[in-house]
Amino acid sequence: MTAQTSIKATGLTKRFGDGATAKTVIDHQDFALHAGQLTLLMGPSGSGKSTLLAMVSGLLKPDDGTVIALGEDLWSLSEANREKLRLASVGFIFQGFNLFPALSARENVQTVLETMGLAPREAIERSIAALEQVGLGDRVDLLPRQLSGGEKQRVATARALAKQPRLLFADEPTSALDRANGERIADLLRTAAHTTGAAVLCVTHDPRLKDHADRQLWIEDGRISSETDATRQDRRS
Amino acid sequence: MPVLGIPLSLDPTSPARMQSIPQNLMAALSEPGAVLIDEADARKLGINRIGDTAEINRQRVRVVGFTSGFRSSWGAFVFASQATARLLGDDDRSNPLYLIQVKDPREAEATRDRLNANALEAPYTVWEKHDLIESSEMVWLIDSGAGASFGFSAFVAFLVGIGVTSQTLRGAVLAQLKELASLRALGVPASKLRAIVVEQAIWVGLVGIPVMLVGAGLVQVLAGALKVAIAYPWPASVTCCLFLLIVALLSGIHAVRALYRSNPTELLL
């Protein structure tokens, strides 16, 4: 089975700083992300993995290269159109959970859905469904401070999944979690990829997540140096 | 101590009667040399209790009762019957004031105009009751220094209110920069986030109104205990509520600027 390519980046380059202090973080790299797969992007600290994620997700403009995301040349779009694309098709999960402390789990999810233009009733139903999907069906009305770290990250995951995104980005989503909770998040990401056909990119330095990935990329010194594992199907066959 | 004498008609049917002074106190004024003073002014006049005596224009007077709510902003008001007032040397007839009651209130305006038309030779002016109240309020608010200093105090309070509220809202925005940035990453446009901040500010204002009303009520109770008469006419109260909302709105608009610090890229790098 050939996976459909959701993101195709070519010649991606990012430098930080000027003149003598300039540092090339990503140096003319090509990168592809496929629908229906959980892709792990691993590498040591400072290897440029988060920078790569920021560029292919439309948050950080590359100095050179192109990103074609869902058929759109991401960095040729206007800021407003890039925002629209993100709103319609992109989910994010961050290392910090970034939930509004005054809003319940459901309201944290619902806010984004309402911005997408869903009617309040539909937004509520979909928020609850997303929270049930991550195993928090009985905690929808709790505030973030009443939830454990693992539960908070599951709310953040629900917030990303409720959008039914075609692209899902996770940046170190398990680094603040214990093993069981970390694996649970990884499992949710893979299930989301397989059941919704979303292209999921998870940046991590957590080796425990390897077993959950369909595909692994290694990045070091700004170069995607190896694609260690083929897809799970390939491995099994 | 300078005092302002107010001669009263003791006739309950006279237009010059003072409705806010109880009838029994009015009756007590019929005794020659009897006066009323306000309870708020008693101490500065050296009066401790009913029955104390004092001197006005070298004439002995006796305090037969206390009014309330007539605190004077300078010396003190002294209420007396017209007979006592004459006794005390109320002989300044240069600017007499007359109260005229028109039998048919509907004729009041026409009567006023007719009298004013005749005022060419001897200069005088006739006001209707509400005109007099209004023009006297305007003199206090605009021509007197008290009104101007009150106005500027209110303006300073307005600016301080905006300053405090906007800093509070700004603090709230800054405390949630990461959460707001993650919404931006998810594609929620900055304009929507601005709207959320301004909406929060308006809610702060709306919640502030009942709080302000309770506060105003407490101030009134406190003022009452200190014998200071305070009234909240509804146009002034509505204006205050609007001011409060404007303070909240302007504060929200000012606090929105803190949003420009929310950059979703910073969540990653």
Image (spheres, coloured by chain):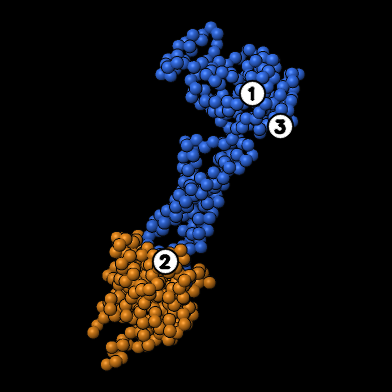
Chain colours: A orange, B blue
Image point (43%, 73%), residue name: A152
Which residue is at the front of the view, B230 or A13?
Answer: B230
Q: Amino acid at mark 3?
A: Arg
Q: Quadrant of residue A39?
A: bottom left
Task: Rate crowding at label 2 as few (under 14), some (14 to 19) or many (20 or more) other CA atoms within 10 Å.
Answer: many
Amino acid type indicated by mark 2: Ser
Residue A104 shows which numbered tag? 2
Task: Give the residue at x 62% y 30%.
Answer: B67
User: Label 1, on which residue?
Assistant: B28
The quadrant of the picture occupied by the N terminus of chain B is top right
Q: At x 58% / y 25%, what residue is drawn?
A: B23
The percent coordinates of residue B105 (x first, y second) are 43, 19
**B202 displayed left or right of B28:** left
Q: Badge 1: few (under 14), some or many (20 or more) residues near its Cα, within 10 Å?
A: some
Residue B83 placement (x, y as % from top left): 65, 15
The residue sitting at 45% across, 69% down in the picture is A144
* Mark 1 or 2: the one toward you: 1
Disc 3 target residue: B49
| Distance of label 1 from label 2 (alpha carbons) | 69 Å
